[in-house]
Amino acid sequence: MKRLKKILVWTALSVGVLVVAFLLFVAYFTWSTSRELESRLAELRAEGAPLSIADFAREPIPPDTNAAIFLQRAGDDVEAVWKELTALCPKSGVPPLELSEAEIEKLDDIFSAYPKLMPLLEQAAACPDYDSQPDVPHSPAAFLEPLYDRGSKFRNVIRVLQARSRLLTAKGLLDDAVANQILMLKLCEAWSAEPFLPSYLIRVACRGLAVEGANEVLRVGPVAPASREALDAELAVLDTSDDLIWALRSERAFSLAAIRDSFKNAIWVPGVMGNSVALTFLDFYDQCLEHASRPYWQSRFEPRFQVGWNPLDVMITLLLPALQSAREANERVRAVSRSLRVLNALQAHEIDEVPANLDGLGLPKEATIDPFNGEPLRVKKPPGGWLVYSVGKDRRDEDGMWAGRRLFGLGPIEEEKAARQP
């Protein structure tokens, strides 16, 4: 009995020592990771980077300089026009390229019924700043719902303008149609101030619609040199990765806020896990931002990280595909935008000979480069007109087509219509 009692006592003492040692280790690890985390966050604060949902709140700006205010004022008219367009064109809400006289008259009536719509959108595009003045709730998730609502309304703005472009083109008002596409691009530029990847992807998709619409207009007939110059200038402004970098920086702030929200009532061990996963996320976003700042063809978007002892590190593996897709989306639209600049210049210089000399178009060298391989964009001239395109992320050139679909570029309208068929 005494021997058993002695064993139990020593066992209890051993367990107690192990528990104390474990708690001391956890305390030290919590302290050390907290110091490292705070040091990393202090560096980001010094750079002016957002680190929480509260950081997205801004000091009020004058209403007459705020594009978001004019978009809000146009909101009711946009929704009313969109409702009428979906009744007229139930499949997509956007009229076809070829319109009958009756369809032109109907579309004219729709837009004429809302005379304040276009001036408000033009005022929005002319504003030097954008602030949607969001409420900043304590919960990160609560910040997203109104953002998604704004995104849905902005998509409708672009769809309405897309329909207006089809109307102007059908009426032969090609310079007005080009101005309409420039308006779409300017609004996309304003919208890029909204944070997070969903907003960024909306902007990329809407910019793609504007570029495709401009291609349609340029294929129909000649436009004035001033229209071409204005279009090229706007495309040059948007040929950047700044909006992708902003999306990543804002996503980093959301991730940190979500981690803090999840561990705010945590005890020691979960606290250690929270510090660890926050540091892992910071390392991950550092790599993403580094890759986003370099040309795609020089540095594929494949950040490397190790999943350590913390089971929450697996969250990064779930986020990685979305960020890779976002980078590729940026390059796709960049490739199509550059293709449009080349097409615009080819038409402006009235070049017919093949192969075309891209160096003689008066464009900056980078504007003629395929972002996916660092080589000049492919330029060919099938019977229907110029075909300008990128080889895409697979770097395969099959005359601008792959699996029956157009690669990232622009061709004659009939070919574009065929390439978009399911």
Image (tube, rainbow, N blue to C red):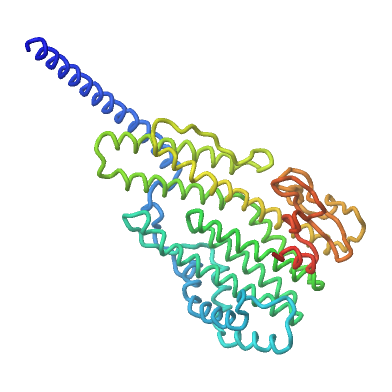
The answer to which quarter of the image holds residue 303 is top right
Total residue callouts:
0
172 sits to left or right of 250: right
Image quarter hosting the N terminus: top left
Residue 339 in view (yes/no):
no
> Where is 170 relative to 296, above or below?
below
User: Which is nearer the eye, 362 or 379?
Assistant: 379
Seen in the picture, residue 114 relative to 178 is either above or below; the reply is: below
Residue 148, position in %: x, y? 46, 63
Task: Residue lying at the far top in this picture: please name it.
Answer: 3
Residue that appears at 70% across and 53% down? 335
Q: Is residue 144 left or right of residue 162?
A: left
- On the image, the x and y values in percent for residue 372 come to 70, 46
Check the picture and name the quadrant holding the C terminus: bottom right
* Residue 414 in which image quadrant: bottom right
Residue sticking out furthest to the front: 1
What percent of the width, then of the height, locates residue 204? 60, 58
Residue 157 higher or lower than 260, as above or below:
below
* For residue 363, side relative to residue 86 (left or right): right
Front residue of this view, candidates 360 and 8: 8
Near-viewer residue (6 or 246): 6
Image position, residue 380 (x, y; %): 85, 56
* Rendered position, 277 above or below 104: above
Res. 260 visible in picture: yes
Q: Residue furthest right?
A: 353
**Which residue is painted at 68% across and 71% down in the image?**
179
